[in-house]
Structures are given as structure tokens and as C-alpha cells.
Amino acid sequence: MFVIKKSEILKRNVFLLFVLLNSPVVLSQNRITGIVKDSNLEVLAGVIVCQGNSENCTITDLNGSFQLVPDKKKGSTLNFSFPGYKSVSINFIDTIKTDLIIQMDIDDSVLLIYPDKGPFITDPSLKGWGFVASLQFDMIINRFGEFSSLLGNDNIELMNNLNVVSGWELSASYNRYQAGIIYGFSDAGKYDHDSLVMKTNTALYGLSFGFKIIDGKRFVITPKIAAKWYRYRLVNYDKDRKISLNQYLLDRDLDLRFNQITGFFGASLAYKLYIDNFIFSSDYWTIGFYGGYIFKLNDNPWIYSKHNRLIDDNKIRMNNLNVGVSMSFVID
């Protein structure tokens, strides 16, 4: 009589369970499959299929077919994009049970600068209101040499160092139009000179207007015009509590504000950085630079000292090149 021990039965059951759990049938992941066609029902090869704004992407083959294994952490949207065609999005991909048939229509409004460079293709889906917050470092070269006979070389040397202003630009956008306000500030520090303490700083206020001629998946090019008001402040005061009358009349306390209004026209180039699952799926950051021509709107600066308007024929010499770098956060 042939007898099978209970221990052998248990071993066989464990082995069978191990085989089942590791078989392709059990471990196969849910795949989204389908085919992409154009409006003439011709298959489209090379269509980019991505889950949300993530890097979980694939491309349709020569037969227009695709398959993608979704990641639950990457969102519930499937995006289809192809140069010259309107983008298509499918929501709630976790409920898809059958093969998809996607139809993409030609978009005549798409602007192709370099047809083989996808990042430069204008995205027609970018429309409506948006918000842009930019951190800027604005560089402009000024020279106050004409005031040296009045203010002294030490003050002029200090004021000539006010070339970089850091600040913010807050803008609202609608479709491709953009308008914003600018505020910046720069402090050149405090220095001792004989019996005096010298301080100087710059404040920047402005309005800007732009139009995005290219707003692609990766690059944004925006021609801009702006009006900028630079206010340069120079302060001299005695560092001792008690000074003689002669010394006071010789040094003089100064609190001067030089106001220069300028116009600007140029352009900015920015590169988009997408951050997946950050507040809204359409949000992105940009880093870039801008440059252009700057010119004075008032030839002589308006000079104020406390409540007094001061008149002088000297001018601030200004380099006509205005450049800067910026980092922005965008909500479309």
C-alpha cells in the first residue's frame, strides 16, 4: 500500500502556490492599448502618449498602435500629442477595459518654427487666464560722473556700483498676452569716509507688457515693452554725535533721491521645467534670461532732497543695454 505523508502534501501545496503566484497570468499588469488615427482614419505613427505630465510615455508604432503600463502615482490622465495636430486627453484611465481608438485632428493654428524641434511647437491648448511670479536680477550700467564736482568722487564711486537690482515681477496672462508690475531693490552698503557715513541704494518700479510668440512644451519666447522707474538714493550723515559747526557746514548732511524714468523693449527666452503633481498638473517653472534696449524718458533726473525739488543740468549716463535673468512660477 502506497501512503503519502501529510508533510509531503503540504510541501506540494506550497510549491503549487509559489508557481501560481509567479506565473505571467497572475503577475501581468493592466496595460492600456489602442490605436491612433487622423481625421481620415489613417494611422498615425510617432504619436507621443504620456500619463499626465510624467515621464511614463510611449510612442505609437508604424501601425499607429501603442501600449502603456499606467502608474497609479502618475495621475489618471492620458495625453496624446503630435506636431501639427490638436492634443487629445483621456481621463479616468483606471476605468479603461477595452482597446482605445483615438482620433486626432489637424490644427491649422499651430506655429512651427522648426518642424523637427518639438519643444518649439506652440501648444494650442494654452489659453485662458494665468498667473506668473518671477524673481529677477536686472542689470543696468549707470554713470554719475557729471555730479562729481558737487558730490565728490567718493560718493560718485559708490553710486556707480548700483548696477544690479533684484526684485519681483507679478504678471497676469490671457491667452498669449501678459502684463505685470515690477518692484526691485538694491543696497550698495554703508561706508565710512573721514567723519561721514555714506549709504546708497536703488529702488525699481515698473510696468511690463508682453506677447508670447512661441509657447511650446519646453520653450517660451516673449517680446516685451516696459516702463521702468529707477530711484537712486544717496545719504551722508556724520558718524559722531557732536561735531563743530564748521565741520557740519563743510560736510553737509545729504539725503538725495535721483529719479530716472526709462523705456525698454526687448525679449525674453525661458525654458520650462515641469513638476509633476505640484498643486496643479498644469503648473510649471521657467528659468531664462532677457535683454533689450533701454532709453531715458526724462533727459535730466528729477532730484529731491526731503521735500525740496533740486534743479541741475547734469545727467546720468546710461548704457543702452539692459539684461537680466529670471526664474518664474506659472499657473495656466
Image (cartoon, rainbow, N blue to C red):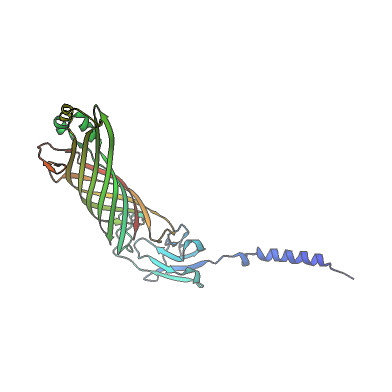
Residue 42 visible (yes or no): no
Q: Residue at x 36, y 60 (%)?
A: 83
In this view of the protein, which residue sits in the foreground, 164 or 75? 164
In this rendering, the answer to whether 230 lies above or below 253 is below
Classify the position of the C terminus by image quarter: bottom left
Q: Quadrant of the N terminus?
A: bottom right
Q: Position of residue 79 (x, y in %)?
A: 42, 64
In the drawing, does residue 169 fall left or right of residue 43?
Answer: left
In this rendering, position of residue 287 left or right of residue 195: right
Q: Is residue 15 visible?
A: yes
Q: Nearer the viewer, residue 154 or 96?
A: 154
| Residue 306 drawn above or below residue 21 | above
Above or below, comparing residue 87 to residue 275 in the picture: below
Question: Of 281 and 159, which appears nearest the observer?
Answer: 159
Point 44% across, 66% down: residue: 77
**5 to the left or right of 303:** right
Query: Farthest residue toward the right?
Result: 1
In the rendered image, residue 152, in percent from the top left (x then y), is placed at 18, 29
Identified at 41% across, 60% down, the residue is 279
Q: Position of residue 158 (x, y in %)?
A: 24, 33
Could you say which quadrant of the image residue 7 lies in? bottom right
Question: Residue 123: image x %, image y %?
Answer: 33, 60
Q: What is the count of numbered marks? A: 0
